[in-house]
Amino acid sequence: YTIWVGGLNYAATADDLRSHFAECGSIVDVRLRMDNDTGKSRGFAHIDFNDKAAHQAALNMNESEHMGRSLRVD
């Protein structure tokens, strides 16, 4: 069960995202997408959850604020 998260602060880390979405349920993996040339964040990530309930809870966090930015969650 995977969500896409956009609108990330470019300084956000995988651990930051784990903390932000921890209340949703068990997180299997966080894949923060980086630019191949610069090594800097591209401002989005994919997060895998263990079950459908956690996935739905994460989707409900659309427009939540993280590090001063409003997140888009799909």
Image: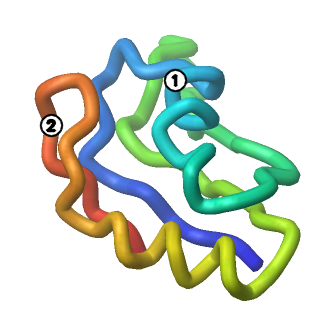
Amino acid bearing label 1: Asp
Q: Mark 1 points at which residue?
A: 16
Secondary structure of the residue carrying numbered label 1: helix
Asked if residue 9 is positioned above or below residue 49 in the image, the reply reads above
In this view of the protein, which residue sits in the foreground, 43 or 63? 63
Q: Which residue is drawn at 55% across and 83% down?
A: 56
Q: Position of residue 25 (x, y in %)?
A: 70, 59
Cα distance between the residues tagged 1 and 2: 13 Å
Query: Compared to 27, does 41 lie above or below?
Result: above
| Mark 2: secondary structure | strand
Render colour scheme = rainbow
Q: Residue at x 43, y 46 (%)?
A: 44
Task: Bin the neighbour count of mark 2 within 10 Å (Cα to Cα): few under 14, some 14-19, many 20 and up.
Answer: few
Mark sitting earlier along the chain (1/2):
1
Q: Give the amino acid type for the residue marked by disc 2 in the picture.
A: Arg
* Vertical comparison of 48 with 11: above or below: below
Residue under label 2: 69
Task: Write the residue at 49% across / 12% down.
Answer: 38
Do the residues under discs 1 and 2 have CB atoms within 8 angstroms? no
- The image quadrant where one finds the C terminus is bottom left
Kindly identify the residue that appears in the image at 25 percent across and 47 percent down: 7
Q: How crowded is mark 1: few (under 14 residues within 10 Å), some or many (20 or more)?
A: few
Is 5 in front, or is 65? 65
The image quadrant of residue 46 is bottom right
The spot of residue 23 in percent (x, y) is 56, 51
Q: In this view, does 46 lie to the left or right of 62?
A: right
Identify the disc placed on residue 26: none
